[in-house]
Every structure is written in structure tokens, then in C-alpha cells.
Image (tube, grey):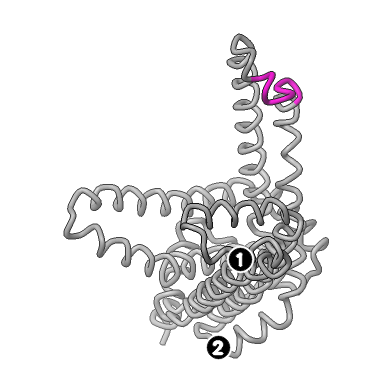
Amino acid sequence: MNEDLGRILNKGFGTWSHNYGIAVPFFLNMMASLFILMMAVFIIPFIVAATSMSDIGGASSLTTEESMELLMSLFSDNIVLVLVLGLIAFLAISFVQSYFEAGAIGMAQAASASGHTTFDDMFRAGKDNVFSLFFTRIIISLIFLAGIVFIVPGMLVMGDFNSFIDNPENALLTSMLLLFGFLLWGLYVLVIDIIFSIVRFGLVLDRLDPMEALEIGYSFFMNNKLVVFLMYLVVIGMSIAINLVGELISYVEVLANAWIFLSFVLSFAVIQPLVTVWWTRLYMDRTGKELYDISDLLEYP
């Protein structure tokens, strides 16, 4: 018999509370992603400057404002190079995130099945699934991006920006059309995110390739619409609750700075690992996989 959502949340919390190490992949992911981002911030301007040495020969005599104008000019003149380098950095971060996310799901699987997990589970799951999860993330991102069609009508109506400014009587209608397009795009992304919310878990737990994972994820959602939607609401609700607490605490100056650090730690040390365990348990339960339940051992020693 399938577990209801309340039992999944309760048992998942118990699994997480006995396996705090599941937070490690999220911490490593944060550190590695931050490192790549910082490298990109330093390296991209250096490469752009290196390709335009003739344009910055006398830059040492420029004021700060003139230097910033020169830098912006270099970026605009090398926009293709900047976009390519930015894309490389984005893909590198996405690859790292795929590795550690797969590792975290692997740890959650081991903990849910046996009651404990080790870092070997993280390394094994990360190594076995990083490429599949990486390509799956790219495919889903492209599906999200396809929603740009919703703002095309507004962009076409707006036409040339100068003519848009020169005709204020049409500006309101065009702006409303664009706003409506963005709202539809946001709704489209939300729906797709809910439908494919289980995809990465199925991919790791069943060692699927990207297309199989998308197909299984869609089928899983269609067969478990209510529980998936409710789980999604629980996760969103947790984020909203933390933000509300942050807003309230921000009025107390003494606590505001402490909360910034605390919420940062809560994100990768508690929220992300716990949510990963919940989604993992949901998928394992609905697909008939064996689940560990410590309460059974306590009840029947």
C-alpha cells in the first residue's frame, strides 16, 4: 500500500534526521559553483581585454569613469565572445550541479532504503548519472525557453523601440500585451516544472537516460498528480515561510544580519537535503522500491 503524503513527509524527516551527511553534496555544489562563477568574473574581462589590446593602450591615464566607459565599450564590441564565454561558464556550473545533485539523490536513496548512507553513495551516483542529468537539465531548460513564443506577439506589436516611444497612445496596449505574454510564460514554466519535478529523481534512482527520464517523469506525474502537486506546494510553502520570517526579522536590526547567515545555512544544510529525501521517498514508494522504516525496528525489536 502506498504511503500518503503525511507519512512520506514524516518518514522522510526521520531519514534526514539520521543522515545529516546528505547536506554535504549541496555544500560542495555551492562552493564549486561559486568558484567557477568567480573565475568567470575575473577571466572573461581579462580575455576581452587581451583581444583588444590596441584599444586600451593608454588606459592607465584614464579616470575611473572613463575606464568604465572603455570597459563597457569593449564588452559591447566583443558581445559574441562574451556570450560564448558566459555560456561556457553556465554549462560548467550546470555540469557541477548535475554531479552533486545526482550524488545527493544517490545518498537519499541509500538512506531511504537502508537507513544510512555514506559519501561513497554520493560519488557513485554522481559518477554514474552526471552526464545524463546534465543533458536532462539542458533539455528542460530549452523546454522552458520555448515559452518565449508567448511574448513574441507583444514584441511584434512594439516593433522598433523608437517608434514605440514616439507613439505613447499605443504604449499602454503594447505594454499590457507584453505583460500578459510574460505572465503566460511564467505560468507555462510553472506547469512544466511541476510536471517534470520528479524527472531527476527517476533518472538517478532507475539509471535512466535523458529521454527515458522525461518520459517516466511525465508518466509518474500523470499517475500521481495530486500527491506530486501537494509535495510541490509543501516545498514552495517552506520557501515562502522562510522568506516571511526573514522579512519579519529584518525589522530587528540586531537579528537581521544573523538571519542572513542562518537562512543561508538552512538552505543547503536543511531545506535542500530534506526536500531531496522527500522527493526520493515519494518516487521509491510509488514505484514499489523497498523503503527503510526505523519505527518498524523500534516497534518490533
- Decide: few, some or many residues near mark 2? Use Cα within 10 Å; few <14, some 14-19, many ≥20: some
Q: In which quadrant is the N terminus drawn?
A: bottom right
| Residue position for label 1 | 285
Residue 202 visible in the current orientation? no
Can residue 163 be seen in this snapshot?
Answer: yes
Residue at the location (54% across, 61% down)?
Answer: 3
Q: Position of residue 27 (x, y in %)?
A: 48, 76
Is residue 158 within the magenta segment? yes
| 170 sits to left or right of 34 | right
- Residue type at mark 2 is Phe
Q: Position of residue 268 (x, y in %)?
A: 45, 69
Q: Residue at position x 41%, y 54% from top?
A: 238
Q: Is residue 120 above or below residue 25?
A: below
Q: Which mark is residue 119?
A: 2
Alpha carbon of mark 2 to alpha carbon of mark 1: how far?
Answer: 24 Å
**Secondary structure under the numbered disc 2 in the rendered image:** helix
Question: 291 or 177: which is nearer to us?
Answer: 177
Circle 1 crowding by C-alpha within 10 Å: few under 14, some 14–19, many from 20: some
Image depth: mark 2 or mark 1 in front = 2
Q: Which mark is residue 62?
A: none
Q: Main secondary structure of the magenta part?
A: helix
Element at badge 1? helix
Residue situated in front as seen by the camera: 103 or 294: 103
Residue type beneath disc 1:
Asp
Magenta-drawn segment: 156-164
Horizontal relation, residue 211 to residue 58: left or right: right
Q: Residue 239, position in %: x, y?
A: 42, 53
Q: Quadrant of the C terminus?
A: bottom left
What residue do we see at 47% from left, 50% from top? 236
Q: Is residue 289 magenta?
A: no
In the foreground, 250 or 266: 250
